[in-house]
Amino acid sequence: MPRIPDRRINKVAAAVGTALALAAVTAFGVAPLREAELPPPETIVESLELKPEVTATPDTFVQSERVRRGETVASLLERLGAADAQFLKFAANDPVARRLLQLQSGRSVTAEVDASGRVLWLQYRHGKLNASEPEKATRLTIRRDDERFEAVDEPAPVERHVEMAAMVINSSLFAATDAAGVPESIAAKVADILDAEIDLRRDLRRGAQLRIVYETLREADSLSAPEATRVLAVQLRNAGKRHEAVWFDRGGDGNGEGEYFRFDGSSLRKAFLRNPLEFSRVSSGFSNGRMHPLHGNMRAHKGVDFAAPAGAPVRASGDGVVEFVGKQRGYGNVIVLRHRDGISTLYAHLRGFAGTLVAGDKVQQGELIGFVGSTGWATGPHLHYEFMVDGKHVDPMTVAFGESEPLSLLERARFRAGTGELVARIGQLDPLRLAANFE
């Protein structure tokens, strides 16, 4: 038997060993580990030394909120993320900062608050935007300097916008404007403007087409909603007739003391409004003798009583100067206005007066002067209104009101140049072409 060399035996042995090793590895990789073979869970607790972290100045954030109905300064600050007793104390005692206590719902308040809840500064526009003097709009700013505060009135940036609306009237003017999203104040102004042309209660026909161009003012950089201020142009097509008006600054000095004219330049304005209230009814007319509701005897009633809810706005019936504002026996809170041509008007039983109205102030026709109340000898909320010519009482519901002075040749040239764009805008508003608003 031939002898196998040792080196061949060694090679064979090595090959067999390698094969067995590979087989073992393959078996180990395929066979699953039993649960008992898994290492037991182990919890490690390690103590760490925490070094104090150096922080920068507290973070601040700026936030704006709209004032809610019936809201207080404290609840507003809470919504702004502030808890600042020092600020509240300052706002309650500082004569300028106290204006913040008279929050108007819907107005915007902006404040910067730090991480500890301190108010760094706060801004709030407390005055109403004025169409004739928008540049005079002011807002209250309260700033913190360490632990001290300063309150100042600063100019508020104002944005002016022109809005347009077209609608078809199917029941009433106010129902149509409400459906079209036109502010109620603008609808009331439209009714006043057209009052000299058409009786909107009796003569308005279904299907009448109304076009309105009006102005809104808005405080820039705020959440406050735009405030409708003035009707710029209006056109009503009713029963085959066209009634139209456009605003014109007759003085040309930019003070906003204009009036309404027809598109041909003829005046629409009456010297006085027939009704110093927007929404009311006559509860007691002018009479030389009637039974007094309180005293029970026959007395002359030298004015007209308009029934209206308490707080309803009272308007100046014509341009004039405040002759008296205060209390007068049975009249309660009363305002007397002096007008041109020896005419004066009286407004009695008011709950209060508008703003800081004082004797000597000039007022424009339609301007807010007070609010309906029941002061003095009154059985309920209403406005007592008197109209006097050279000191003699006349019935304001029957007296003839003249129109304003016609435009001069120079004014007519300015009228055509200044109102052309507004008249063109009215022409662009086609209720049948646009998505008309129906009630």
Image: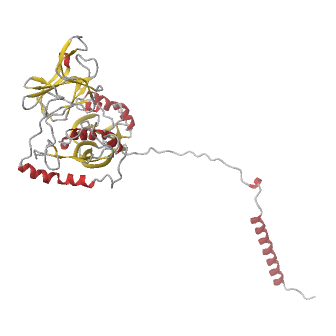
The structure residue drawn at horizontal position 38% and vertical position 40%, both measured from the top left corner, is: 115
Q: Position of residue 214 (x, y in %)?
A: 25, 46
Q: Is residue 334 above or below residue 50?
A: above
Q: Position of residue 148 (x, y in %)?
A: 26, 34
Tell me where residue 169 sits by quadrant: top left
Q: Position of residue 86 (x, y in %)?
A: 32, 31
Tell me where residue 364 sits by quadrant: top left
Left or right for 291, reference 117:
left
What colouring does the structure picture have?
Answer: secondary structure
Question: Is 155 in front, or is 39?
Answer: 155
Q: Is residue 400 visible?
A: yes
Left or right for 343, reference 230:
left
- Which quadrant would the C terminus be assigned to in this image? top left
Question: Is 198 in front, or is 158?
Answer: 198
The structure residue drawn at horizontal position 62% and vertical position 47%, both measured from the top left corner, is: 44
Q: Position of residue 402 (x, y in %)?
A: 11, 36
Instruction: Name the outermost residue toward the right.
Output: 1
Tell me where residue 204 sits by quadrant: top left
Left or right for 389, reference 436:
left
Q: Is residue 350 visible?
A: no
Question: Is 407 in front, or is 251?
Answer: 407
Instruction: Name the outermost residue toward the bottom.
Output: 2
Question: Is 352 in front, or is 69?
Answer: 352
- Which quadrant would the N terminus be assigned to in this image? bottom right
How many circles with numbers are drawn on the protein? Answer: 0
Q: Is residue 300 above or below residue 24?
A: above
Q: Is residue 101 above or below residue 439?
A: above
